[in-house]
Image: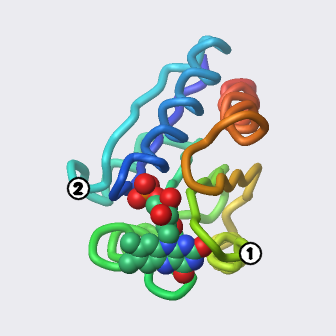
Amino acid sequence: MAKLLIVYWSGTGNTEKMAELIAKGAKAGNADVELKSVSLVSPNIIDGYDVIALGSPSMGVEVIEEDEMEPFVQAIESKLSGKKIALFGSYGWGDGEWMRDWEERMKDCKAEVVGTVIAQDSPEGDSEQECISLGAKLSAL
Ligand SMILES: Cc1cc2nc3c(=O)[nH]c(=O)nc-3n(C[C@H](O)[C@H](O)[C@H](O)COP(=O)(O)O)c2cc1C
């Protein structure tokens, strides 16, 4: 059974909803899913997982959230080589630049980025389905 860790930050609930949809898709594929707000975990949590989904909305000026998610990501960067990573997050008005930059950053750490999903505001319609499909994909890794 695939073991999946999902860690996210969400201020107004949109990225949290995406995390829940990814978990739903993964559970439907019989994955063992751990879903955690970044504020509740230490970076060491990733040690037990080879498949990890990380979520953050676009904050600041096209960056991941800076007070909790950024320190978490910095702390795990040295341990990402060979891990399968999915990235997701909500945005408001940009063109997804924060997600492109985040994906490049994870690839520079030699992580295998297996999927990304972005949703404008709350995940609905196509982006809702994309979250569920990403979860299904992760459950099959
Ligand atoms: C301080 C702040 C900075 C933001 N910066 C951006 C940005 O640079 N680009 C963008 O597209 N959206 C930006 N947004 C909009 C959020 O990404 C958007 O509201 C998102 O849905 C929030 O997700 P959440 O509900 O998971 O917190 C910003 C929002 C806040 C509060």
In the picture provided, is 125 more to the left or to the right than 16?
A: right
The x, y position of residue 126, in whole percent, is 78, 37
Q: Label 2's element?
A: helix
The x, y position of residue 38, in whole percent, is 31, 54
Residue on which the image places disc 2: 39
Whole-angstrom CA distance, mark 1 to mark 2, is: 27 Å
Outermost residue, left side: 40
The x, y position of residue 60, in whole percent, is 44, 84
Within 10 Å of disc 1 (Cα), the crowding (few <14, some 14-19, many 20+) is few
Residue type indicated by callout 1: Asp
Could one spot residue 141 in this view of the protein? no
Q: Is mark 1 within 8 Å of ligand 1?
A: yes
**Vertical placement of residue 42 versus 24, above or below:** below
The x, y position of residue 56, in whole percent, is 48, 61
* Residue at x 42%, y 48% (from the top left corner): 7
* Residue at x 43%, y 43% (from the top left corner): 16
Residue type indicated by callout 2: Ser
